[in-house]
Image (tube, helix red, strand yellow):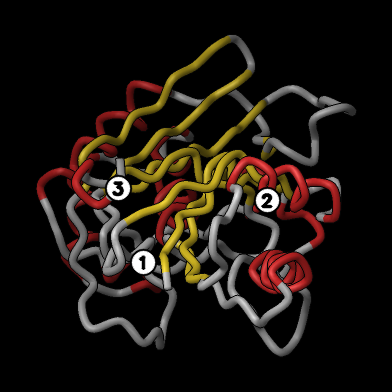
Amino acid sequence: MKRYFLYLSYNGENYCGWQIQPNGLAVQEVVEKALATLLRQPTPIVGAGRTDAGVHARMMVAHFDSDCEGLDLKRLTSKLNSILPKDIAIYKIVEVKADAHARFDAVSRLYKYYITTAKDPFLHKLKYRAIGDLNVEAMNACADILFEYVDFTSFSKLHTDVKTNDCQIMYARWEQDGDDYVFTIKANRFLRNMVRSIVGTLLEAGRGRLDTDGMRRIIEAKDRGVAGTSVLGHALFLEDVEYPDDIFEI
């Protein structure tokens, strides 16, 4: 039995999220069915994390096990792409060590959230439209406060099954290009709904309704009810997942 990492991207518009759920079609379910068809046996996959309904991924990583001898990974990648729907694409499949884990071995995840203040009939499904100009300096000042803390209960969906709400944020920054704003955030892990609730809170700063002291009070409250409203998922992208080099079979 060998273990493999599968690198893929997907448009999440038509899915209830990454993880298999009883109330909708998940990306994980579609990929598992395609793998099972080609490998001729049930092939469960484990993702680097879970994305919510409507959220996209430019780079998701998942692992699976197979006892198929002489597996041609380039050919398997091509065959998967030929049977998967247009909104899911496989980049590559690589062999990793037997105990490598797509979720637990990831050292960081990077997300981006895309906002525009312009009305764009072509990209409205991929960007969140904000009304009025935003103060980038104020949003970045509040984003800097994130580095002072590790407990982000105030930005977590309620009643989740995680053991800790501690996260190490490595990068958090807004960039503006004309009418477009992009928020990039990188951490060792994220809580459910965390990025979207952080963005919604930072938008309050951009509109002049929140300062750095208020940002501290929100985080220290450890109460989801005091943070801003979560923005919609259609403009959120999982951009990258990083792993240590020593888990790969060279």
| Among the two numbered marks 2 and 1 on one chain, the one whose residue lies closer to the N terminus | 2
Q: x and y percent of residue 245 in the render? A: 22, 41
Residue at disc 1, secondary structure: loop
Q: x and y percent of residue 44 in the render? A: 57, 77
| Among the two numbered marks 3 and 2 on one chain, the one whose residue lies closer to the N terminus | 2
Residue at disc 3, secondary structure: loop
The answer to which quarter of the image holds residue 184 is top left
Q: Which residue is mark 3?
A: 248
Question: How far, Cα to Cα, is label 2 from label 1?
Answer: 33 Å
The answer to which quarter of the image holds residue 115 is top right
Residue 193 visible somewhere in the drawing: no
Of the pair 30 and 26, the residue shown nearer to us: 30
**For the point 18% across and 42% down, which residue is it?**
145
Residue 55 visible somewhere in the drawing: yes
In the rendered image of this protein, does residue 107 appear above or below residue 145? Answer: below
Of the pair 43 and 200, the residue shown nearer to us: 43
Of the pair 104 and 99, the residue shown nearer to us: 99
Question: How far, Cα to Cα, is label 3 from label 2?
Answer: 19 Å
Q: Which residue is mark 2?
A: 76
Three-letter residue code for mark 3: Phe
Numbered disc in front, either 3 or 1: 3
Three-letter residue code for mark 2: Leu
Label 2 crowd bin: few (<14), some (14–19), many (20+), radius 10 Å: some
Q: Which residue is mark 1?
A: 191
